[in-house]
Image (cartoon, rainbow, N blue to C red):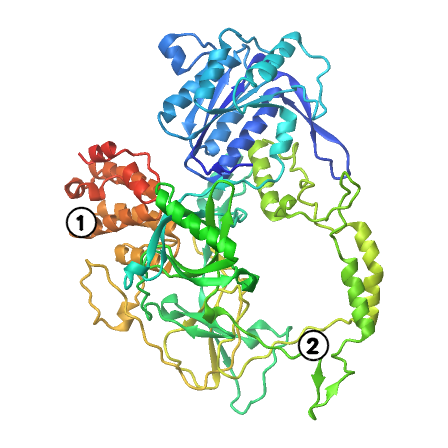
Amino acid sequence: MPAERAGYTVTMFLVDVSKSMGAIRSVPLPPGPNGEERSAKMTHLQHALQYVKFKIQTMIYEGRKTDQCGITIFGTEGTDNQINAANGGYEHVTEYIPIAQPTAVTLKKLDQLEPSDDYGDPIDAIIVGVESQNKYLGKKTWTRKVVLVTDGEGPIELEDWEATAQKMNELNIGFTVVGVDFDDEDYGYIQKEKLHIKRVNEEFLVKEFVPAINGAIAGNLDRVIEQVSLPDVKLSRSTLMKSVLRIGDVDARAEEAMEILIKTSKCTAFSRPKAFKKFAYRPKTAEELEAEQRAMEANENFEKTVTFAQLKARTEYFIDLRAHKEEEEEDIKVEENEDEDERRSLDKVEKEQLIKGFKYGTSYVPCPEGQFQRLPTKQGIDLIGFIPEKKFRREFSMGEIQYIWGNPDNASAQCALSSMVQAMYEKGVLAVARWVTADGRDPKMGIMSPALFEQVHCLLWAPMPFADDVRKYTFPSLTELTNKKGETLTEHPYLPTEEQLEAMDEFVDAMDLMVAGDKDEEGNRAEWFDPRDSYNPSFHRLKQAMFHCAIVADLDTNPLPPPNPELLKYFNPPRKMVKKAQGAIDNCVKVLNVKHVPKMAKVARKDGHSHAQDDDDEPLLLDRKPSTSKPSQAQSQVKIEPKPASIPADDGSETEDSDTEMLLDKVEPPRKPNVLPTPARSLSPSSNRNDNDDDDNAMDVDPQRDFGRLIGRSYPLNDFKDNLKRGDLVSKAVEDMCVVIKEIVLAPFASRRSKEMLECMTELRDVCLKEDEIDAWNAFLPDIKSKCLHSTPGNKEFWSEVQGTGRPLGLISDKEAKECGGSSEITEAEATKFLK
């Protein structure tokens, strides 16, 4: 299946709301708690809208601004479409929802649809939908789709339908017909008592109209709903990012080096299930209770309501203080059932008093922010050397794969890269390279493998660790043991016997699943597990639950169905294989004398280091200031897991959760306090502070930074640049920067910071252009213009300064975006006109 372009699609849904769509049908539901069969009564329209809402919910789930849709209904009692308004005709067709990015409001409007008392012509609806889609897109090369949902029981005007099909082919429109109770022999459904008009219309749509359109398909509604409910992996084309591949030293030895213009794109991308927001019961205030009491006195049938509030996560930091006797030298063992209050004493500290510590081995190394200068890197991929493919260790490939293409607009670059790929393939070598995504960014080491596709040659990139990150551990031999005298032992509890080796060989052979699958056409059994047919259950089950809640109005009468069998396919191994291997398992347990190993108690260390936790733990934050406690007290920083924000009680005060679970790390006290240098805070250009300020002032908290933001109002430019240097969330930083600039510009005495805000906007525009946040900038600039000119009090003087700057602070046009590998809907003429 070819990959589609991610987003940049307009889908027109043409929904039949004619009188016949009001017929009642019985839809089967999942079995009840006791396995009883259940069903629900609904109209043809309600059943058909489940498919439409499912497709729209998919667009909402993906969240792409360039994935848009429009809804046109036909069979309405009235008429409301642009063709009728201009030229007449096309009766009973209404443009219900204009083309836009779908939201929850779109689904709500679909729930309001009801069957009418008239009929509409599907061909009229197709023409109206295609015309509105064509008028909206204009000359844009977006993907166009039209989906017709109907029961085919209304009259169809068959005159000149070929012209409509030809127009759809010229516009390269993907057409789909979803028929209510349409015959489908492959699905095993044939409607027995079918009206004559429906039989004629169905044959016309399926056998004449659909074949006349390139790539068009038609299907039964029940089958289509079943197919869209199946788990799938969506393939999409990644955006090409321009870069350069350098071979040799282009600066020192330019005559011996060369540069190849390339573009990169993602080959694989990691996907995570959607996160849910947490809510909890919120006690009602005194005013709410009083209002509820008055309502109950006025209306006896008044029902009390329960209010829920969203929980907000927060992080607090504590020092773990633990007193020990000086004469104690033995390791201190912590019993699992020891009371928390007896063995821990916590001292709360502020985040500003801490610095980051990164794990190195089993210890944490403090690394104050700004202590090390960043490498002066240059964007591009530098070829380091080649290694034989057979000598590459597969475990060094550690991350997502990316394509490296020759620049599509440069024939010489494509030929050069293709020659390199073919040479690497013939020699059987891989290339080691150093990749820098942008000037000043941290470099990445990776391995490049040649890929010779049918019509194009490219390289596949996979990140690999630096040499310092590779640990070499040596272990004693598992088959040879020597005693203190140097004699080789032949019998020892650590040495396996022949009987044990045979038992393990039998067990491994019994677990072989290569012949545990179904038989093929020739009668040979295939392997049991196929990665192409396996899906992440947590991802798809969560998606199934979200979609079901979005398309179903009543969960009591139509509950969430069980997981699709495809998700449970590989949950349990084949029973016959388990039964076959049971004898080998019992033999291993007997021969190897397998026993339960009790859990070992945790032991505190005495070397004064903070003991590292698991590999997935976040960097530890260490106390920045030198220790002031006695050497007999252990000090280690402890991070508490994010805790839901307190919910206001009746009196307006906050209540805290006393049962918050804390992850505490226990260490022995350091022998000598380690005084660490305090990094100086970098200031924004408009600040009057200098580097001679004391350390305490340099590390003050920004009181102008709102909770949850990366950018504060005190030094926004500095915060923005620091966030980009750390490689944090670029989209979040851009979003916060836009909000902060608008707040400062519209605040009183904003003229004092006009120059600083212009610098912020210049930096913001540059980042949006390079980091593919063009839509964010093009949405921000009209918004701040409107607020400066039309809001109260506004700031017309500042907008005049923006106009005086000219195009460097104007909208990002399609020409500029194309040069940076992005896209924009704004033309150069529109961008120039915007500032006038």
Work out whether residue 115 or residue 142 is closer to the camera in this orientation and state it. Answer: 142
Packing grade of label 1 (10 A; few <14, some 14-19, many >=20) is some
List x then y, in percent, for residue 164: 47, 14
List x then y, in percent, for residue 232: 59, 40
What residue do we see at 30% from left, 43% from top? 819
| 764 relative to 474 in the view: left or right | left
Quadrant hosting residue 238: top left
Amino acid on which the number 2 mark rests in the picture: Leu
Q: Which mark is residue 738?
A: none
Work out whether residue 52 or residue 581 is closer to the camera in this orientation and state it. Answer: 581
Quadrant hosting residue 742: top left
Work out whether residue 691 or residue 125 is closer to the camera in this orientation and state it. Answer: 125
Residue receiving disc 2: 478
Quadrant hosting residue 434: bottom left
| 173 relative to 688 in the view: left or right | right
Amino acid on which the number 1 mark rests in the picture: Ser
Between disc 2 and disc 1, the foreground one is: 2
List x then y, in percent, for residue 279: 52, 48
**What is the CA distance from the residue labelled 2 to the residue labelled 1?**
72 Å
Residue 345 visible in the snapshot: yes
Q: Mark 2 or mark 1: name the one nearer the start of the chain.
A: 2
Residue 250 visible in the snapshot: no
Work out whether residue 486 or residue 729 is closer to the camera in this orientation and state it. Answer: 486
Work out whether 264 lies above or below 343.
above
| 695 relative to 601 in the view: left or right | left
What residue do we see at 24% from left, 51% from top? 760
| 63 relative to 35 in the view: left or right | left
- Element assignment for label 1: helix
Quadrant where the N terminus is found in the figure: top right
Work out whether 290 lies above or below 179.
below
- Element assignment for label 2: loop
Residue receiving disc 1: 754
